[in-house]
Image (cartoon, rainbow, N blue to C red):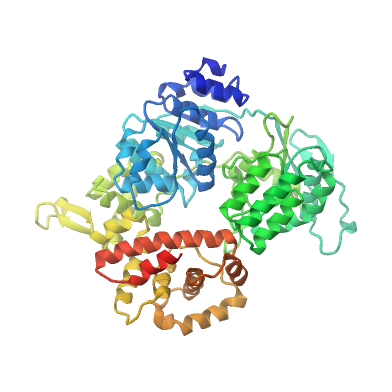
Amino acid sequence: MQVDALPLATPRVAHFQRQGIEQLYPPQAETVDAGICAGENVMAAIPTASGKTLIAQLAMLTADGPGLYIVPLRALATEKHATFSELPGVDVGVATGDYDSPAAELADHDIVVATSEKVDSAVRNGASWVDNIGCVVVDEVHLLGQADRGPTLEVTLAHLRRLTPGVQLVALSATVANADEIADWLGAELVESDWRPVDLRTGVADSNVVTYDDERSDPIGIEAAELPPDADLDTETTARLVDDALADGGQSLAFVRSRREAETLAERLRGDVDDTTSDDTTQPDREAVADEIETLDDTVTGQRLADCVRDGVAFHHAGLRSGHRALVESAFRERTLEAICATPTLAAGVNVPARRVVVRDQQRYTGSGTEWLPVLEIHQMCGRAGRPHLDPYGEAILVDTDDPEALADRYLDADPEAVESKLASEAALRTHVLSIIASDFAETEAGILDVLAATFYAHQTPVGDLAGIVAAVIEELIGMGLVVRNSADGTDNVDGRVLAATEIGATVSTQYITPETGVRIVEGLRTAGEMAEPTTLTALEIICDTPDMHDTYLGNEERAAIYEYARQHADEFTTAMGDTEDFERWLEAVKTARILAEWSEGATIETLVERYRLGPGDLDSRVERADWLLSAADAIAGVLGVSLPAISRVRTQL
């Protein structure tokens, strides 16, 4: 199917043609046949790099109303905003933060790119612009199966379908075992394909040979006896595989389990990359990118990244500042960089294809031990192999120098897992049941179950199975002081009871914090209101000791120092050291509060990163979260009638 045969305005057809898109890929053509340009619901479950972005654009450009593009990550929102902004005559907005407003300004855009959390918060706050949406595109819809993001995504979709009957739904997904089930839930025509624009061969490597799925093999020839005593065989094998790809004119991605190992591998590859890529025409571009990285900050991490970039390699993980990650991704796409060493977060949607993908680690540390990565996650990493229009093929290689055959059985010969709803989690239901009540979507248990009947959970499991959990969650919310039960007719008739959010409960919901965080803030504010001189540290301890603030790692070597700091400032905290339910978790909160206090007092990012052993990106995320949680605390303080000037003071200093 030719692009000029599509129902698009001439300038938009010309735009795609300038990008080299003259003819649709087969999966793209199948979505057109399924009615994507005619307002029909469509789900495309196709491999990475098979044209999902164009499918989304076709839907939104032909929709009867503005388009909403829902993404799981802020980085992906930024990338898609840039892509869609190039469309002729299209005004694109992006929304990823400010969880306490309906974001009325979004009504002015033809396309809005937003995270599911932002859309959920806008719905909670009564966003009227949602009613006018003509098309909703959900990227990475298989993330319904994630415990952290999944429940919000499915409840948000359930709300959108209820608030905007007839809205076109387009779901984009990697290949999963039950794509037909997700499509059926959405009332969508399923387009499922394993077609790729670039052939992909996968394999497993030990230190001697790569064995591919097509039974071909390539020698590696590393002799363990020739390596230094402290050398890691898996790492040396990974480095050799990357070197070979670069020598053949391709780029490479290497996935490892941790931030530290991503940086270590990048350092290990620096000399190899410089030796392998003799063409130095890109060196001025590398220098320019490195200079930009140094301009963002002068942290040890930033300097290390800049040094690697000058040698044509980079590392990529969540500890980097968002600006650093964006520079690395852009430089890689422009072929300024030859290799990236990354944690698995890079596999989640960001557009960075490479000739060869090497997955050194297939397990990750969970806090209590290691666990195998899901098959779907490994397949997404592998799907990054092969750059359309640049590579004749793509290669994805898993490294296991102990038992490569078992690894191939586990991942390469296995189908991705089925997507299963995680909404039945009580923690998730507390948040969403409170939202349903506070937003006046339902006032009885039966009404709440009716709202939840539109979720993916209810599609997989009889919604009645949630009745007991929902009843228990409602009792918990009542016990928290966030919900009350009243009689509809003024009597004690149980059958006529109605549920309503208290003023605190409504504030917790609209501020987009979890009920557990809301209760902790309420308790902290009440205690602070009775203190003689609550300080900046008082306000920060309250919001840092909540589930919504990211944990800050507390190393054994610094534990004593943080303990002593907590003892010295005990009279500024709302929790007594002897009254904590989880002392270690509270000490982590104290550490975070101390970092934020020093930041508010003018400490530099360089100083804090070095002093507290955190990544510059970690500091950025905590400052951002602190601003959000302080705003929520300020709103709750207003409801409680508690005066805590330190909240406003520290917000202006962050």
Q: Residue 350, image x and y in percent? A: 58, 42
Work out whether residue 570 can be spotted.
yes
Residue furthest left in the image: 490
Name the side, left or right, on which 483 lies relative to 416.
Answer: left
Work out whether residue 472 can be spotted.
no
Instruction: Name which quarter of the figure residue 520 lies in.
Output: bottom left
Quarter of the rendering occupied by the N terminus = top right
Q: Is residue 534 above or below residue 304?
A: below
Q: Residue 407, image x and y in percent? A: 70, 47
Q: Residue 284, image x and y in percent? A: 75, 45
Residue furthest top in the image: 5
Q: Is residue 642 above or below residue 186?
A: below
**Relative depth, front residue between 341 and 409:** 341
Name the side, left or right, on which 426 lies relative to 30.
Answer: left
Residue at the location (87% across, 47% down)? 221
Name the side, left or right, on which 568 lies relative to 491.
Answer: right
Instruction: Name which quarter of the figure residue 534 lies in.
Output: bottom left
Q: Is residue 165 above or below residue 496?
A: above
Name the side, left or right, on which 473 lies relative to 282.
Answer: left
Residue at the location (56% across, 67% down)? 604
**Relative depth, front residue between 369 and 563:** 563
